[in-house]
Image (cartoon, helix red, strand yellow):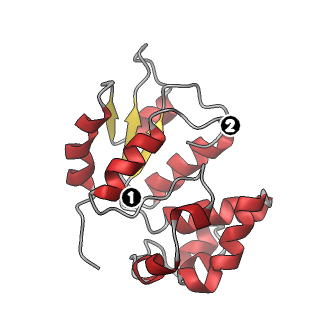
Amino acid sequence: MSGYSEQPSWVEPLRQVLVQAGYLVYNPWDNINAQFGQQDIGSLNSLPVRLVKSLCSILQIPEEVLLPFDAVWKLIEQGDNNDNFGVVFQCLWFLTRSSLVICDLIRPMAGAGTAQEMLYSKQLNLPVIGLLPTSGQLNPFVQRTTTVLFNSSDLLALLPAIKGYAPITSP
């Protein structure tokens, strides 16, 4: 979802449905404090990390992403202030704990952010659901890094795929 000047219209309605279903949902468009509060720290700290220290070095990811949320909360908040390192760190911290990535492929990939997130998702063996443009045309990189392509305007139809790739587990 990175690289756009405004959030795609489908993001917030889908986020609300997923939160109501019991998912922890990270949206890079919103401030961290608007998404998560003190009541979420235990759940965020218990998310499994898809990375180990040696892979951080190989992938050039800061080792601090391995730390629990409460230890890096201030660093994550820096992303909300447009601090470049904070923005990248925030995305990486959540990406390394994600069970699924939903990516807007409807608009042309406007920047390197979306492509980088898709590449890291591939490296971390994260499934990526891509919202397919109406033209149906994708570049080869997107085809190789997307697990499932979705082309319906009914976003609720996404729920079975989301539940299939990222079942809700109790903390």
**Residue 58 shown left or right of residue 75 in the figure:** left
- Location of residue 152 in the rendering, given as x and y in whole percent from the top left corner: 30, 25
- Location of residue 171 in the rendering, given as x and y in whole percent from the top left corner: 29, 80
Instruction: Give how far apart the Cα atoms at labels 2 and 1 are.
Output: 22 Å
Q: Which mark is residue 125?
A: 1
The quarter of the picture where the N terminus appears is top right
Q: Is residue 126 visible?
A: yes
Amino acid on which disc 2 is placed: Gly
Dot 1, how many residues are within 10 Å of its Cα: few (below 14), some (14-19), or many (20+)? some
- Location of residue 98 in the rendering, given as x and y in whole percent from the top left corner: 42, 63
* Residue at position x 55%, y 50% in the image: 117
Q: Is residue 145 visible?
A: no
Earlier sequence position, callout 2 versus callout 1: 2
Dot 2, how many residues are within 10 Å of its Cα: few (below 14), some (14-19), or many (20+)? few
- Location of residue 72 in the rendering, given as x and y in whole percent from the top left corner: 64, 80
Badge 1 marks a residue whose secondary structure is: loop
Amino acid on which disc 1 is placed: Asn
Identify the residue position indicated by label 2 in the image: 111
